[in-house]
Image (cartoon, rainbow, N blue to C red):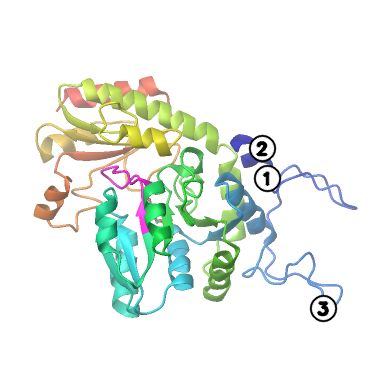
Amino acid sequence: MNFSTKSIHTGEKPDFREGASGDVIASLHLSTTFARKEVDTPTAGFEYSRSANPTRKTLEQKLAAIEKAEFGLAFASGLAAETGVLMALLKTGDHVVATDDLYGGTQRLFRKVFATNYGIDFSFADTSKPADIKNAITENTKLIWVESPTNPLLKLSDIAKIATIAKQNGIIVVVDNTFMSPFFQNPLELGADIVLHSTSKYINGHSDSIGGAVMLNDKSLFEKIQFIQNSAGAILSPFDSYIVLRGIKTLSMRMEKHAENAYAIAEFLERHPKVKKVIYPGLKSNPQHELAKKQMSGFGGMITVELKGDLTGTEKFIKNLHYFSLAESLGGVESLIELPALMTHASVPRKDRIKLGITDTLIRISVGVEDAGDLINDMEAALSVV
Ligand SMILES: *Cc1c(COP(=O)(O)O)cnc(C)c1O
């Protein structure tokens, strides 16, 4: 099966058993517990919904299928999925090498929970440079944790190269694939061991469910993470599982449209005299365009733009847009825009922020699936008042 067929059919087929009604979609199973006919035989393997639930199981099968993985696990949020992986695989004294501009919530989890309370060591490296990773590895390194592209600067790391370095050193590679979705990038095929998603973004895609996913091929790693999923209990609810199942059915169409719209907007902005710089891996001018073509099958729906001028002008531009809501998060059908300097990265001191490239006029856009012409006209009008 190819992607769009899997996204619709995996785990869901009409139920024609005796007394069943032939529903064409997976049912929403809200039951917390499952009765058995015989004392020693759980019905269809289900006992208690934290351990396994039929709706969540269908979603977990579908998540695995779309990421070309053997196993999938659904958690209550992206950060709950990350916590599950860290708890399953690390103990005090272990060391992790992570991308230096990881998602802010991930950095907080690493620095303020796992480093501070549990004695795990983290090194933050520029994972776009394999030499920086090699330098950061110690004899205690258990994981390399990569985000590609990063947020908001859309920096790419060569996942296949990182996997090779990791294998030589017996280290597990985790890739947060949230920004690309399984439609445009499959890190397991590039040699990564574990893929992680915030399903709150593209996978669900409708900005109405917080959730997380882990996909992998190794059975023993899967069993360790599944043990934590049940023991710590941060599972995705049956209702959210149902919502995400529904979202996945249109993932391929949405991603194609996100990417098509993002490319059109990136090209428009690149030509605009009030724009200083456009970062989009799909543009030929992007310094990592060749790597993007090598490891991704499309370039996604995220664009980062730096305007000429100052913070006041940038705020004015954002306030004059009609179809781009000023909000954090990304990956939904509606277009969103945010100003990292005042929003997602406000806690980073200005000097450090600017050194990283997150200037006062840098804007992050999550391009939705509206009509590209309407979106471009909206931007053109808002730029004209700056
Ligand atoms: C949103 C996000 C997360 C965290 O996911 P939640 O579902 O909000 O917990 C992790 N990584 C990336 C790249 C994200 O965008």
Q: Which residue matches tag 3?
A: 40
The quarter in which the N terminus is drawn is top right
Q: In 3D space, how far apart are the residues under numbered discs 2 and 3 (Cα atoms)?
A: 37 Å
Amino acid of disc 3: Asp
Task: Please state the quadrant of the image where ligand 1 appears.
Answer: bottom left
Q: Which residue matches tag 2?
A: 1
User: In front of the other: label 2 or label 3?
Assistant: 2
> Magenta residues, as a range?
145-158
User: In front of the other: label 1 or label 2?
Assistant: 2
SS category of the residue bearing label 2: loop
Q: Is residue 367 magenta?
A: no
- In the depicted structure, whether residue 271 falls above or below residue 155: above
Apparent side of residue 265 relative to residue 369 in the rendered image (left or right): left
Apparent side of residue 15 relative to residue 135 in the rendered image (left or right): right
Residue 17 % position (x, y)? 87, 51
Q: Which residue is rendered at x = 85% and y = 47% of the image?
A: 16
The quarter in which the C terminus is drawn is top left
Q: Do labels 1 and 2 touch, CB within 8 Å?
A: yes
Q: Which residue is rendered at x = 12% and y = 54% of the image?
A: 352
Residue 152 % position (x, y)? 27, 45
Nearer-N-terminus badge (1/2): 2
- In the depicted structure, whether residue 250 falls above or below residue 82: above
| Crowding at mark 2 (Cα within 10 Å: few <14, some 14-19, many 20+) | few
Q: In 3D space, how far apart are the residues under numbered discs 1 and 2 (Cα atoms)?
A: 9 Å
Nearer-N-terminus badge (3/1): 1
Foreground residue, 135 or 106?
A: 135
Q: Is residue 154 magenta?
A: yes
Residue 112 % position (x, y)? 29, 71
Q: Which residue matches tag 1?
A: 10
